[in-house]
Image: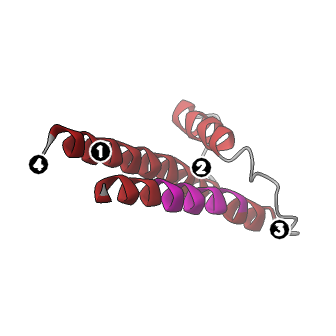
């Protein structure tokens, strides 16, 4: 394997891991919200802030009557998009 292909594989792996971590943070916030985690806790606050930043474009995109449905749909959409795009780019890099 030439160094060029090895670099593309490493870049693809890094992109996939970053996408996975972003989706994990969003999924963790959804779970914490649904389980009514203590928002005064520093870790919960950190996850909420990170998830709000990651899902800034999809937060309040949906106008369901129930708050839990808005959280699941808005943050869940962001998680799915990050996973899809991140892994699509990673697979593209792995092919070259």
Q: Earlier in the sequence, mark 4 or mark 1?
A: 4
Pick the residue in front: 48 or 5: 5
**Residue 2 location (% of width, % of height):** 14, 43
Closer to the observer: label 2 or label 4?
Answer: 4
Q: Which residue does the numbered mark 2 point to in the structure image?
A: 37
Q: Which residue does the numbered mark 4 point to in the structure image?
A: 1
Give the residue displayed 34% in from the left and 48% down from the top. 12
Give the residue displayed 67% in from the left and 38% down from the top. 53
Label 1's element? helix
In this image, 53 relative to 60: left or right? left
Real-space Cα distance between discs 4 and 1? 11 Å
Q: Which residues are magenta?
A: 74-86
**Residue 51 location (% of width, % of height):** 62, 44
Real-space Cα distance between discs 3 and 1? 44 Å
Quarter of the figure with residue 89:
bottom left
Q: Earlier in the sequence, mark 3 or mark 1?
A: 1
Does residue 71 lie above or below 41 as drawn? below
Give the residue displayed 73% in from the left and 43% down from the top. 56
- Mark 3 Cα-neighbour bin, 10 Å: few <14, some 14–19, many ≥20: few
Q: Which residue does the numbered mark 1 point to in the structure image?
A: 8
Q: Earlier in the sequence, mark 2 or mark 1?
A: 1
Residue 25's tag is: none
Closer to the observer: label 3 or label 4?
Answer: 4
Q: Is residue 75 magenta?
A: yes
Label 3's element? loop
Give the residue displayed 56% in from the left and 40% down from the top. 47
Pick the residue in front: 91 or 58: 91
């Amino acid at each position: 394997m030439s160094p060029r292909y090895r670099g593309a594989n490493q870049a693809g792996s890094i992109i996939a891991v970053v996408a996975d971590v972003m989706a994990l943070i969003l999924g963790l916030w959804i779970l914490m919200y649904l389980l009514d985690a203590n928002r005064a806790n520093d870790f919960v606050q950190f996850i909420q802030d990170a998830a709000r930043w990651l899902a800034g474009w999809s937060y309040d995109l949906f106008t369901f009557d129930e708050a839990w449905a808005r959280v699941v749909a808005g943050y869940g959409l962001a998680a799915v998009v990050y996973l899809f795009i991140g892994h699509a780019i990673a697979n593209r890099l792995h092919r070259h």
